[in-house]
Image (cartoon, helix red, strand yellow):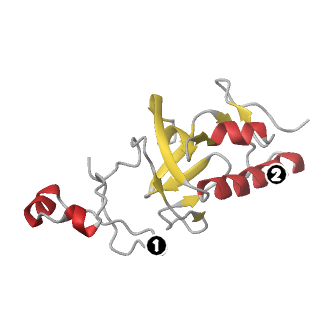
Amino acid sequence: MNRPTDPHRRRPAGQRRLRLPLALIALAGCGGALGLVLQPAATPLSAPGGERIAFSYCRDGSALNCVVDGDTFRMDGARIRIADIDTPETRPARCPREAALGAAATRRLHTLLNAGVVALHPIDRDTDRYGRKLRRVTVDGRGVGDTLVAEGLVRPYRGRRMGWCD
């Protein structure tokens, strides 16, 4: 499955990827001489290899790659929900403690996603009731959910959401 391309989407400098059909390289007979690294076009919702993308914060709803809150982000326009964590809500938070933890989880998720190669791994369910893609997420091979849990910003997901206010 090929993902739609946006001609206005820009990668950070030094992260542009050259994708040429293999037939073109074979025809030219100089792929190795040019030092080209061939990569198949990846589907971001299922590619285990992942890709490095610059994420912003979702402010006005128009960003293709942005962090919504501590467990949700957009990647190439698709809404992704990290499947293995329970995160404090930010909109609306039910108490000041939940608001503070939710904001911290959001900032940390933003930092983690920008720190390396992001890969999405399918689970037994494809989407949640809001239409978000449910995925286990890794950055440079490390589980984002595991990192957020270890840092005390989120909890492992246990089949239902639990409150954050005491």
Mark 1 burial class by Cα count in 10 Å: few <14, some 14-19, many 20+: few
At horizontal 39% and vertical 69% (from top left) the residue drawn is 16
Q: Is residue 41 left or right of residue 134?
A: left
At horizontal 61% and vertical 56% (from top left) the residue drawn is 68
Residue 122 image position (x, y, % from top left):
45, 34
In three-dimensional space, the C-alpha distance between marks 1 and 2, rounded to whole angstroms, equals 37 Å
Mark 2 burial class by Cα count in 10 Å: few <14, some 14-19, many 20+: some
Circle 2 SS class = helix
Mark 1 or 2: the one toward you: 1
As shown in the figure, which amino acid type bears the numbered disc 2?
Ala
Q: Is residue 33 above or below residue 73?
A: below
At horizontal 23% and vertical 61% (from top left) the residue drawn is 32
Q: Is residue 50 left or right of residue 17?
A: right
Residue tagged 2: 99
Outermost front residue: 33
Viewer-nearest residue: 94 or 53: 53
Residue 119 image position (x, y, % from top left):
49, 45
Residue 144 image-quadrant placement: top right
* Tag 1–tag 2 contact (CB < 8 Å): no
Outermost left residue: 27
Q: Which mark is residue 14?
A: 1
